């Protein structure tokens, strides 16, 4: 029970560990955040503000490896998650010439109708944007009503968007395409190849991409099917060298 003198109007500001101050400043500035405090000596403290929320950074504990992506993180609850993703990806295209979909920093793919996405900052922190009305019980394991390659694609989406596990998503897509490819539709196979191209890029294994791309080029897709394939990735520009020519 609250004390009568305590007013329920608190503001919580995430304080995240930072191992890459220069990169962190450049990244959030590129996304349109204002730097409200900047200090590196005698101790590190950075503060950013955008829209209605703040992100603060302090000294990281020794031994943190950003590549493990287990540094820290926070949740940002919003009313309309799609608009946030659109703003951030547009800022990335403007500043970097592409959506950052691999390594650090990066942004995860947003599928129309999804209720969350994640930004990984240069220090390996996860800033997760979540729709306020997201269902309490999410289907993380894939719908049991889906079958074959459709179920594989859904499972890979869950592994990437909710569990941030690109390696597991790659394994699911690779084995699923071999197992169910012969019985799947052309657009399903093309979507799986597109997802493999993106995941291989995110895993910094570009040598795999030409194999998937060459297969993708062989498909004869309608305009609607092309849109479906492009929707399977966060950055359709990754597919441009490999998409079959328009009829």
Image (tube, helix red, strand yellow):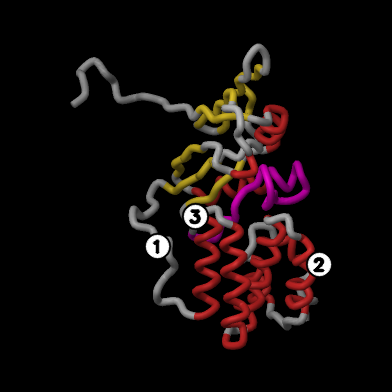
Dot 3: element? loop
Dot 2: element? loop
Which residue range is magenta in the image?
91-113
* Cβ–Cβ under 8 Å for marks 1 and 2: no
Q: Nearer the viewer, residue 124 or 101?
A: 124
To which residue does mark 3 refer?
162
Residue 35 position within the rendered picture, expressed as x and y whole percent measured from the top left: 64, 24
Dot 2: within a 10 Å radius of its alpha carbon, few (fewer than 14), some, or many (20 or more) residues? few
Q: Reply yes or no: does residue 135 show up in magenta.
A: no
The quadrant of the rendering that contains the C terminus is bottom right
Tell me the quarter of the picture where residue 160 sits. Answer: bottom right
Q: Is residue 212 above or below residue 95?
A: below
What's the residue at 46%, 47% (across, down)?
Answer: 130
The circle drawn on residue 139 is: 1
Q: CA distance from mark 1 to mark 3?
A: 10 Å
Dot 1: element? loop
Residue 159 position within the rendered picture, expressed as x and y whole percent measured from the top left: 52, 60
């Amino acid at each position: 029970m609250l004390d009568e003198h305590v007013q329920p109007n608190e503001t919580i500001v995430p304080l995240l560990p930072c191992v890459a101050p220069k990169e962190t400043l450049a990244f959030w500035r590129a996304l349109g955040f204002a730097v409200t405090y900047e200090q590196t000596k005698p101790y590190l403290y950075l503060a950013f503000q955008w829209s209605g929320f703040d992100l603060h950074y302090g000294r990281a504990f020794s031994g943190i490896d950003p590549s493990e992506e287990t540094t820290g993180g926070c949740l940002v609850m919003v009313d309309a998650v799609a608009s946030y993703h659109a703003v951030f990806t547009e800022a990335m295209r403007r500043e970097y010439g592409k959506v950052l979909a691999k390594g650090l920093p990066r942004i995860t793919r947003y599928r129309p109708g999804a209720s969350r996405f994640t930004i990984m900052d240069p220090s390996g922190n996860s800033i997760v944007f979540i729709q306020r009305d997201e269902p309490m019980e999410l289907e993380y394991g894939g719908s049991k009503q889906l079958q074959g390659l459709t179920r594989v694609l859904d499972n890979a989406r869950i592994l990437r968007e909710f569990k941030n596990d690109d390696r597991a998503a790659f394994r699911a897509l690779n084995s699923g395409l071999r197992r169910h490819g012969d019985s799947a539709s052309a657009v399903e196979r093309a979507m799986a190849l597109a997802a493999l191209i993106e995941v291989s890029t995110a895993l910094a294994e570009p040598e795999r991409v030409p194999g998937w791309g060459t297969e993708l080029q062989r498909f004869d897709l309608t305009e609607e099917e092309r849109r479906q394939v492009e929707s399977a990735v966060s950055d359709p520009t990754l597919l441009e060298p490999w998409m079959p020519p328009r009829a």
